[in-house]
Image (spheres, rainbow, N blue to C red):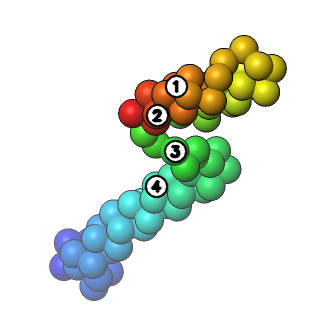
Amino acid sequence: MGGYYGMGIIMPVLGTISVIFVIVFIYFIFEALLGHDSSHGNPSSGAAEDIVKERLAKGEITDEEYLRLIEKIRG
């Protein structure tokens, strides 16, 4: 019987599954706490667009330049 009091191979398998479950649970907890930015493509594009909007508002660039820069930022 392998010394597991009649449980045979079940106890090591359940132990392994339990360890995997705990690791996955901890992973999801960290994911939820840390969070992630929804824009996976280019995380700095939002900041760049904000700068271009500010420059347009200040009158440093024209509407055409604004559209060209936004298109270039978004790729």
Q: Which mark is residue 69?
A: 1
Q: Which mark is residue 39?
A: 3
The residue type indicated by label 3 comes to Ser
Q: Quadrant of residue 17?
A: bottom left
Q: Are marks 3 and 4 in contact (CB under 8 Å)?
A: no
Q: Nearer the viewer, residue 31 or 39?
A: 39
Q: Are marks 2 and 4 in contact (CB under 8 Å)?
A: no
Q: Are marks 3 and 1 in contact (CB under 8 Å)?
A: no
The residue type indicated by label 4 comes to Ile
Q: Tell me the CA gap for discs 2 and 4.
A: 43 Å
Of marks 3 and 2, the one in the foreground: 2
Q: Earlier in the sequence, mark 4 or mark 1?
A: 4
Q: Are marks 4 and 1 in contact (CB under 8 Å)?
A: no
Q: Residue 10, position in %: x, y?
A: 27, 78
Q: Residue 11, position in %: x, y?
A: 32, 74
Q: Tell me the CA gap for discs 2 and 1.
A: 5 Å
Q: Nearer the viewer, residue 2 or 29?
A: 29
SS under mark 1: helix
Q: Earlier in the sequence, mark 3 or mark 2?
A: 3
**Which residue position is annotated with label 2?**
71
Q: Tell me the CA gap for discs 4 and 1.
A: 45 Å
Q: Tell me the CA gap for discs 3 and 4.
A: 27 Å
